[in-house]
Image: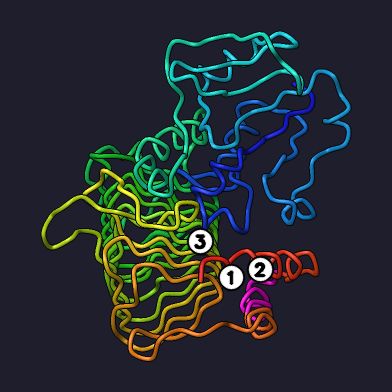
Amino acid sequence: MGHIVLYEEAEVRANLLPLSYTRPVAHLRVGITTIAEKWQDLLPGNYSYDVAEEYLREKYPLSPEAISHPDTLFVASNVIPDKELVDTIKTLEPGQTLVDGNGRTVARRSSHAPAVLSMSGKVVAVDHLYDIFTLNHDAVWADFKRLTSGRKSAPLSTTNTVVGSPDLVFLEDGAQVECAVLNTKNGPVYVGLDAEIMEGSLLRGPVALCEHAVVNMGSKIYGATTLGPYCKAGGELNNVVMTGYSNKAHDGFLGNAVIGEWCNLGAGCVASNLKNNYTLIKLWNYPARRFMPTGLQFCGLIMGDHSRAGINTMFNTATVIGVGVNIYEAGFPRNFVASFSQGSSSAGFTDVPLAGFIDAARRMMARRNIELTPADERMFEAIKECADNYK
């Protein structure tokens, strides 16, 4: 293909706040890779983004050539591709739109494509925050097969114990795994470039570590869990997706959760994923401005980028934390904490000054040799203005 645009609908983007505050929907991580990376691998082309928010367009621009070209392919950015779907998209003629069995628009060839091509099945898509962890099992499996097909794993040290098929353990170059138990009976264990699993850790697949991710000593990781690039994990995790550059390095439980980038959970942080009366869970929804039914019995913490929780923080079931939140003191914060808030359950919450947030974010990112750019600053300024509507 030539020009390919990953576009997002405003409604979809709003339902995926706070994670979509700071990135296109296509940059959400589900499985080992982001949605965009899946498309780029399965359908090579010149990619750009048509994002729903003006303030994201500086960092994630829409290619002028893609707009002017009469045969650009537009793809819904929350749809998770597979080979069968990509093969169907390749059959689109100029002026055709592909619609799945539920009436969802999946792709269109050219910006105005009135002719409809219907497919019988329904696609897999991330429509809600909790879809990220509920879809992660199948997504890790699919990414594992795609990323390792025809390739040979780096050698696994004999200090480890593999329960299940050794063929479902794959180490990229530079990966280090010592004295760990890797159970592949329910899914694979993928250890990315220069990632590390320290001694005494127990992993039950499907589990994926992206590049430079670290599992600390004695950790217990249940599938389906993904540790994004440069994440650190310790304690007990169950069905967690950590997007990247975030730390939950110490003891404490986290389950059925999604953590954004540049987050930190202090020692002893725990997050409930099940109500003690076993009723179905409601989760904060930004566009509705209220807690909405999920149909799930298990749902834990959802945390936006650059948010932090101090030692011994306890999160209630299905807590949503926005962008740039700083929680301190042990105790239970409320189930929704708006972006750029700081405080505790006992003292209450106040605004985080933008200058102070920028300064802390710059220092944290510098630890990974990543620069917080002027474009980032303008993005956070715009997010803060948007977030003020939810306080």
Q: CA distance from mark 3 to mark 2?
A: 20 Å
Query: Which amino acid, by three-letter code, is at mark 2?
Result: Glu
Residue range (magenta): 361-370
Q: Residue at x 29, y 59 (%)?
A: 255
The answer to whether marks 2 and 1 mark residues whose Cβ atoms lie closer than 8 Å is yes
Q: Mark 1 belongs to which amino acid?
A: Asp
Q: Which of the two residues, 268 or 76, is positioned nearer the viewer here?
A: 76
Residue 388 circle label: 1
Label 1, secondary structure: give it.
helix
Q: Give the residue displayed 45% in from the left and 31% down from the top.
A: 145
Disc 3: which residue: 260
In space, the residues marked 2 and 1 are separated at their CA atoms by: 5 Å
Q: Of the numbered discs in the image, which one, if any, rests on residue 385?
A: 2
Figure check: 314 above or below 149: below
Q: Dominant secondary structure of the magenta stretch? A: helix
Looking at the image, the residue that sits furthest to the bottom is: 347
Q: Does the image show residue 200?
A: no
What secondary structure is found at the residue carrying circle 2? helix
**Mark 3 crowd level (few <14, some 14–19, many ≥20, 10 Å Cα):** many
